[in-house]
Image (cartoon, rainbow, N blue to C red):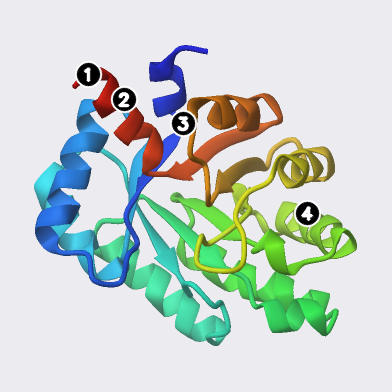
Amino acid sequence: MELNEILARCDHTLLRQDCTAEEIRDLCDQGIRYGCASVCIPPAHVAGAKRYVGDRLKICTVIGFPNGYMTSAAKAFEAHNAIQLGADEVDMVINLGMVKDAAWGDVLEDIQAVRRVSEGKILKVIIETCLLTDDEKIQLCAIVSASGADYIKTSTGFSTGGATFDDVALLRAHCDPRVKVKASGGISSLEDAERFIELGADRLGTSRIVKIAMAQEG
């Protein structure tokens, strides 16, 4: 697979708590230069990034991040506000406590609360696979498929682990074909990126692939 094909699937990501506006602008410049799918940035930077890039690049942000235990109303407000400020895509974190309680109807409603305010935009649902059993992952595949969301996403990158090959294969096997898979967290090489894509990931959440492209130019 050509490097530009991998880059086109990358959400070029900077979610560090202390990232600056200058760093976000640099991230956007890199996303545009290397043809990334989007930049994934904190909500507080969405408005400035949108003014900076205009229509040259998609802006993705995170909702209920990284813990997911906010109320559904708070997540919906956050998503609505982010979209008003210019977000093209939103990546929301599920309520993991609801999952552990097997309160599946509440998990579905939590996702749908965000889906209702984000119609017309891409919605990705972060399930934090490193904290789940395989049975829970499979159940969440069904719920995300039923929710109307566009993607199921492995990880925040802020918990105990990131994307694994086994998890991406499992999510792809159990989600509705309409639902795409995003692998995120710990993707550090072109070989790993290509393997995730082969296993069914349509998007990759990473900053390292752009850094590899920059190094190859250097």
Calculate the distance from the C-alpha at mark 3 to the C-alpha at mark 2: 14 Å
Q: Nearer the viewer, residue 178 or 60?
A: 60
The local crowd at label 1, few if under 14, some if 14 to 19, many if 20 or more residues have their Cα within 10 Å, is few
Residue 145 image position (x, y, % from top left): 74, 52
Contact? badges 4 and 1 (CB < 8 Å): no
Q: Mark 4 or mark 1: which is in front?
A: 1
Residue at the disc numbered 4: 141
Q: Residue at x 57, y 24 (%)?
A: 194
Residue 124 image position (x, y, % from top left): 55, 54
| Residue type highlighted by circle 2 | Ala
| Residue type highlighted by circle 4 | Cys
In the image, is 114 to the left or to the right of 14? Answer: right
Label 1 SS:
helix
Closer to the chain start, of discs 2 and 4, is: 4
Q: Where 39 sits versus 61, above or below?
A: above
Numbered circle sitting on residue 9: 3
Label 3 SS:
loop
In the image, is 204 to the left or to the right of 18? Answer: right
Residue 207 image position (x, y, % from top left): 36, 43
Calculate the distance from the C-alpha at mark 4 to the C-alpha at mark 1: 39 Å
Residue at the disc numbered 2: 213
- Image quadrant in which you'd find residue 37: top left
| Residue type highlighted by circle 3 | Arg
Residue at the disc numbered 1: 217
Calculate the distance from the C-alpha at mark 3 to the C-alpha at mark 1: 20 Å
Closer to the chain start, of discs 4 and 1, is: 4
| Residue type highlighted by circle 1 | Glu
Q: Residue at x 58, y 31 (%)?
A: 192
Label 2 SS:
helix
Closer to the chain start, of discs 3 and 2, is: 3
Contact? badges 4 and 3 (CB < 8 Å): no
